[in-house]
Image (cartoon, rainbow, N blue to C red):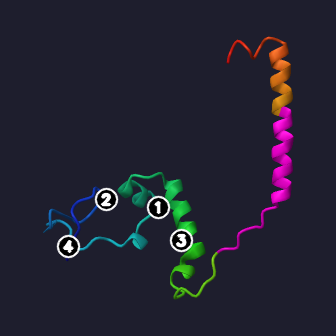
């Protein structure tokens, strides 16, 4: 059995030597979420999230590269520019009001 150097992730061997107590590592599919999270030192919720992501997109990995990229929603650039303009006006107004009140000049 080939093994990578011990990465601290529960590898069955260290420095290329087979662990005497374990001849074959138990597959992840046979473990509970709690066991996997403890082995890899992550929160059980993270394991659950990763599992859901895998189940939702595993077919895309093995489709032979013929799948399409996920659809990106169209961005309304006109609406974004309008919002930027609105926020700029608000910032300018507030800067002027705070400067007149003497609250902004002391900080800058």
Specify which label sits upstream in the sequence, 3 or 1.
Answer: 1
> Closer to the camera, 36 or 93?
93
> Closer to the camera, 100 or 66?
100
- Secondary structure type for disc 1: helix
Q: Main secondary structure of the magenta part?
A: helix
Numbered range of the magenta stretch = 70-90
Label 3 or label 4, whichever lies nearer to me, is 3
Instruction: Report which residue position mark 3 lands on.
Output: 54
Badge 3 vs badge 4, beta-carbon distance below 8 Å: no
- Report the Cα–Cα distance between label 3 and label 2: 20 Å
Badge 3 vs badge 2, beta-carbon distance below 8 Å: no
Instruction: Report which residue position mark 4 lands on.
Output: 23
- Report the Cα–Cα distance between label 3 and label 1: 14 Å
Say if 80 sits above or below 15 in the image: above
Instruction: Report which residue position mark 2 lands on.
Output: 9
Snapshot quadrant of residue 53: bottom right
Snapshot quadrant of residue 22: bottom left
């Amino acid at each position: 059995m080939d093994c990578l150097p011990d990465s601290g992730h529960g590898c069955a061997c260290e420095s290329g030597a087979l662990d005497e107590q374990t001849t074959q590592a138990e597959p992840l599919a046979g473990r509970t979420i709690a066991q996997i999270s403890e082995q890899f030192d992550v929160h059980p919720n993270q394991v659950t999230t990763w599992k859901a992501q895998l189940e939702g997109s595993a077919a895309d990995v093995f489709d032979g590269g013929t799948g399409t990229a996920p659809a990106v929603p169209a961005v309304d650039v006109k609406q974004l520019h309008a919002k930027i303009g609105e926020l700029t006006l608000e910032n300018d107004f507030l800067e002027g009001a705070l400067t007149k009140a003497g609250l902004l000049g002391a900080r800058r």
